[in-house]
Image (spheres, helix red, strand yellow):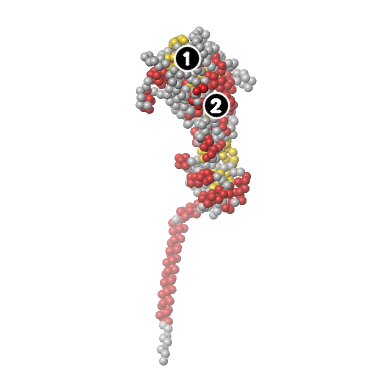
């Protein structure tokens, strides 16, 4: 017989169900409390934090780069401007895997491999994910079309109209104005991250670099609302950028072109200065280059061609070239002799064609090997007599010679706004002891008297030393900027003027330099022939390689780049100088014959009107006439070498 089926215990089941319901209710209540607490924490306690994050997901602050200041010459001709360009930018936040996007870009536009290296550096150097980074400049119509067709494969890439620097006169002012280029890694760490946010380029050389802070301006901003894809929906706030200041230079385009024409295709430099103000009127270094190549990034091939050229077009010869000044330094040595009382204008030295130190057999040759006989200071400058200046330097001694030439700016930076300038070298006993660990020898002082030996100057320093002769010791630092934002620059650390015991000594040297150009026996009289104004000048021919004792210079046996450098300095009108010119021609050999005509052509370009007549503002009384009483022994034979 089967077992009986037990009856259900309804009370027990009811209790079980109630327990489960209570447990579920407690769980739901606890979960609700936890959810409410979490909501309270997020909505109340951390409201500000999450509100900011939410806002940042849709609102971004984008920089607006300022427009770079323009650069003009003294007549208002524009030398550096900004022109619109269609450029390709990438926003890293929107691009996602930007490496893959760049790979796709390289294939679509068929770009060279070297561009990939540039793109990677640009993206890695960008600290802000939402700030567009410019990858390509000046897109062609074909490239813009290809990018538009393939936009779906290139997230984060946009074609934008931007301003880029442009130099309309290209190589004519490359060494003075300089150029801008892309900001590199080192510069990025040193720049103000706020002011330069969104800026892709910075001044690299010349005026562009020295006045970078004035030219750059101040960045502007836009607060924009974006969608999930990063596209701008609307502008919430706009702050206009402040454009950089315009700069007017003292350079004159017509004189610059005249200086370039006069120099021709020869390697060398020209500097022209207004002695009354220190304004640089012309500044030429040849050969030159096109600075526009550097603005948006120069190719490796083009840069290698410029860097490795034997003619060194990137080298600024005016500011960085160091040369022996040769006889162009003799007027300053003459001032040292007169002011120190070592010589007077009437002091005479007999020149047999050489100079010898007491108790020494070595002969320091005059360029005129047959000698000039008895010469005084006036004749020594006119004939560029080496023997006289050998003797004068020996009498002065290295200490006084060093002190006086330093007053003229030799061996130090003289400019106001040219950061690339080299200091040059004015040697001294102390300098040689420290650098060479040797004593100073008398013969080293002797050759300094004619601008040879350890002395090295830049063409700018040589021009400034001559400017001090023309201005009678009044110092004005050479400078390129005439006005910055309409305000003239101020020299906060002016150099002391050169004050002589007798101010007439300036005139005595000036007269000697006039004799160089206008006396029948002046060594550069050919360069002044037919001039409508008085010129004071001095030639210089500086050795590049040494010549053994007893040997003579032979150009046919000397390599072209080992031949002497040709130099010439001059100013006019001599009685009231309005322009000083210094010319250096590498391996030009004869200063008076080669560099002298270059100076004359530049002086004519500045002082004469288009009809070839002296401009009215430069018509001044003639300088003191040549002293007819000075007699110089005629050389027994023709010179064996061009004058130094």
Q: Is residue 185 visible?
A: yes
Pair 2/1: label in front = 1
Disc 2 to disc 1, how far (Cα)? Answer: 29 Å
| Residue at the far right in the pictured view | 611
Whether 164 is drawn above or below 362: the answer is below
Which residue is drawn at the image coordinates 56% and 18% (left, top)?
527
The front one of 331 and 447 is 447
Horizontal arrangement in the rendering, residue 427 relative to residue 96 (left or right): left
The quadrant where residue 6 appears: bottom left
Quarter the N terminus occupies: bottom left
Estimate the x, y position of residue 225 in percent, counting from the top left.
54, 51
Q: Residues within 10 Å of mark 1 (few under 14, many from 20)?
A: some
Which residue is drawn at the image coordinates 51% and 38% (left, top)?
202
The quadrant where residue 141 appears: top right
Q: Mark 2 or mark 1: which comes first in sequence? A: 2
Look at mark 1 in the image and give the residue it sits on: 369
Which residue is drawn at the image coordinates 54% and 12% (left, top)?
520
Which residue is drawn at the image coordinates 55% and 33% (left, top)?
289
The front one of 616 and 105 is 105
Q: Secondary structure at mark 2?
A: loop
Are the residues at dot 2 and dot 1 in contact (C-beta closer than 8 Å)?
A: no
Whether 389 is drawn above or below 117: the answer is above
Q: Secondary structure at mark 1?
A: loop
Look at mark 2 in the image and give the residue it sits on: 266
Estimate the x, y position of residue 82 in percent, counting from the top left.
57, 37
Q: Residues within 10 Å of mark 2 (few under 14, many from 20)?
A: some
């Amino acid at each position: 017989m089967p077992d009986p089926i037990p009856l259900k215990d309804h009370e027990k089941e009811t209790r079980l169900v109630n327990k489960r319901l209570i447990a579920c209710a407690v769980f739901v209540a606890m979960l609700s409390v936890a959810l409410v607490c979490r909501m309270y924490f997020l909505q109340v306690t951390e409201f500000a934090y999450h509100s900011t994050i939410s806002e940042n997901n849709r609102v971004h602050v984008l920089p607006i780069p300022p427009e770079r200041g323009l650069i003009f010459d003294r007549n208002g001709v524009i030398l550096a401007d900004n022109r619109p360009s269609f450029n390709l930018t990438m926003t890293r936040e929107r691009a996602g895997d930007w490496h893959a996007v760049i790979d796709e870009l390289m294939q679509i536009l068929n770009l060279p491999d070297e561009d990939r290296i540039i793109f990677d550096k640009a993206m890695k150097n960008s600290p802000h994910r939402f700030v567009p980074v410019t990858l390509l400049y000046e897109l062609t119509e074909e490239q813009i079309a290809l990018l538009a067709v393939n936009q779906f494969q290139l997230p984060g890439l946009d074609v934008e109209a931007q301003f880029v620097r442009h130099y309309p006169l290209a190589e004519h002012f490359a060494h003075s104005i300089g150029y801008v280029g892309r900001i590199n890694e080192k510069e990025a760490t040193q720049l103000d991250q706020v002011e330069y946010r969104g800026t892709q380029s910075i001044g690299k050389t010349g005026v562009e670099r020295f006045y970078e802070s004035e030219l750059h301006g101040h960045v502007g901003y836009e607060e924009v609302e974006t969608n999930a894809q990063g596209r701008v929906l609307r502008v919430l706030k706009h702050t206009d950028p402040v454009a950089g200041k315009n700069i007017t230079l003292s350079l004159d385009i017509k004189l610059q072109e005249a200086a370039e024409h006069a120099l021709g295709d020869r390697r060398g430099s020209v500097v022209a200065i207004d002695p009354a103000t220190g304004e640089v009127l012309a500044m030429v270094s040849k050969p030159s280059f096109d600075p526009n190549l550097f603005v948006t990034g120069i190719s490796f091939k083009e840069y290698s061609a410029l860097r490795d050229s034997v003619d060194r077009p990137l080298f600024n010869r005016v500011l960085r070239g160091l040369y022996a000044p040769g006889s162009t330094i003799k007027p300053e040595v003459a001032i040292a002799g007169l002011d120190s009382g070592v010589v007077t204008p009437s002091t005479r030295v007999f020149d047999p064609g050489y100079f010898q130190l007491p108790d020494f057999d070595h002969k320091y040759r005059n360029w005129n090997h047959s000698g000039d006989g008895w010469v005084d200071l006036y004749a020594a400058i006119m004939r560029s007599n080496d023997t006289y200046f050998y003797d004068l330097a020996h009498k002065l001694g290295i200490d006084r010679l060093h002190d006086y030439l330093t007053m003229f700016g030799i061996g130090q930076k003289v400019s106001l706004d040219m950061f690339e300038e080299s200091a040059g070298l004015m040697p001294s006993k102390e300098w040689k002891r420290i650098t060479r660990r040797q004593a100073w020898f008398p013969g080293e002082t002797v050759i300094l008297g004619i601008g040879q030996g350890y002395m090295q100057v830049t063409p700018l320093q040589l021009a400034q030393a001559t400017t001090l002769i023309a201005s009678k010791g009044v110092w004005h630092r050479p400078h390129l900027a005439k006005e910055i934002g309409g305000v003239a620059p101020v020299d906060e650390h002016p150099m002391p003027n050169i004050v002589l015991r007798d101010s007439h000594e300036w005139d005595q040297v000036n007269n000697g330099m006039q004799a160089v150009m206008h006396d029948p026996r002046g060594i550069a009289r050919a360069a002044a022939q037919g001039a409508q104004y008085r010129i004071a000048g001095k030639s210089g021919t500086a050795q590049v390689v040494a010549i053994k004792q007893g040997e003579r210079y032979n150009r046919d046996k000397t390599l072209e780049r080992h031949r002497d450098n040709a130099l010439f300095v001059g100013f006019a009108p001599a009685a009231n100088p309005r322009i000083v010119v210094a010319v250096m021609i590498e391996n030009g050999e004869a200063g008076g014959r080669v560099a002298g005509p270059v100076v004359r052509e530049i002086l004519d370009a500045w002082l004469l009107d288009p009809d070839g007549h002296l401009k009215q503002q430069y018509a001044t009384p003639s300088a003191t006439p040549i002293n007819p009483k000075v007699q110089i022994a005629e050389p027994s034979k023709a010179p064996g070498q061009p004058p130094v």
